Amino acid sequence: MKKYLSLVLFAHSIFAMPFAFIGFFLAIHTTNYTFNWLLLLLMLICMVSARNAAMAFNRYLDRDIDALNPRTAMRDIPAGRISAKSALIFTTINCIIFVIATYFINPVCFYLSPVALFVVLFYSYTKRITPLCHLVLGLGLGLAPLGAYLVVTGSFNIVPVLYAFSVLFWVSGFDIIYALQDEEFDRSHHLNSIPAYFGKKGALRISEVLHILSACCVIIPMFYLHLSWFYIIGVLFYCSLLVYQHLIVSPTDLRRVNRAFMTTNGIASVIFAMFFLLDIYFYG
């Protein structure tokens, strides 16, 4: 179990999971649907299984590339801790779990489950195709708030769509920052990424634009929902951490990339979700 948790970097679930809770409780807050523990459990199963499948498949598909890159050579498959076949089986099992869970939620989630799986699995191919791979990763995680809203309601709404775009732009932006570490490796091995295509300076400017768009997408819901100062504090905290990660990383200094990637963004999503939930609990 420890090996498989390492394979899928389970701790990174902290990025999208808080936004899934936002989507789930947004649906309960803004519709006539009531809280249901079974639906919450099924939503969590979908989140975990989809992410497990995506990460395990990525590690399976990139195993030869990871073995060549000094930064990733000690990942579980190239290091020999998990076999490629085992990673593929693990991917398949999680895909099956995901589809079964959606079946017990509602028909909309079930019918859309292949689409969701295609998005999160297709990302692993995109670095071989286009430098826009970061946006595809963002799209995969951006399904979290929208999918969680669908779990409760089975229908679409503009506000969870805005949160989905917020996650898309946010994740794309910080993935570009993380990819700065592999700029030279990606270019020399003909892999596509925004840092390899635009260079470090250009990539950071693109990341900044994406994070500005993400900030806009968490501000706009204030015009659709009755939100209080709790939410405003959450927005300010979220936006300040977006700014902070750009202050600690520069084209000539990548020493704090991991702090910007994991610590800052993990805190941003958790704190923002907490203030959202506090707002709807006390003022909803």
Image (tube, rainbow, N blue to C red):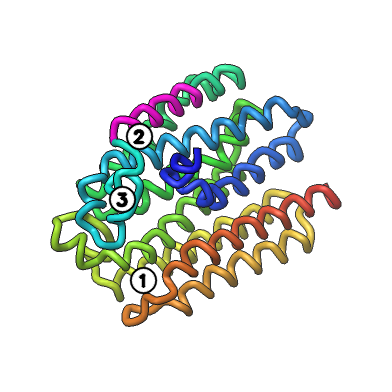
Which residue is found at the position 48% from the left and 20% from the top? Answer: 111
Identify the residue position indicated by label 3 in the image: 133
Which residue is found at the position 36% from the left and 27% from the top? Answer: 89
- Chain-order first, disc 2 or disc 3: 2
Left or right of 280 on screen, residue 196: left
- Does dot 1 land on a helix, a strand or a loop? helix
**Which residues are the magenta region?**
84-98
| Front in this rendered view, residue 71 or 224 | 71
Q: Magenta stretch: dominant SS? A: helix
| Front in this rendered view, residue 213 or 130 | 130
**How far separated are the C-alphas under marks 2 and 3?**
22 Å
Q: Residues within 10 Å of mark 1 (few under 14, many from 20)?
A: many
Left or right of 23 on screen, residue 8: left
Q: Which mark is residue 87?
A: 2
Question: In this view of the protein, can residue 162 be seen by the observer?
Answer: no
Which residue is found at the position 30% from the left and 36% from the top? Answer: 83
Which residue is found at the position 54% from the left and 65% from the top? Answer: 263
**How far separated are the C-alphas under marks 3 and 1?**
16 Å
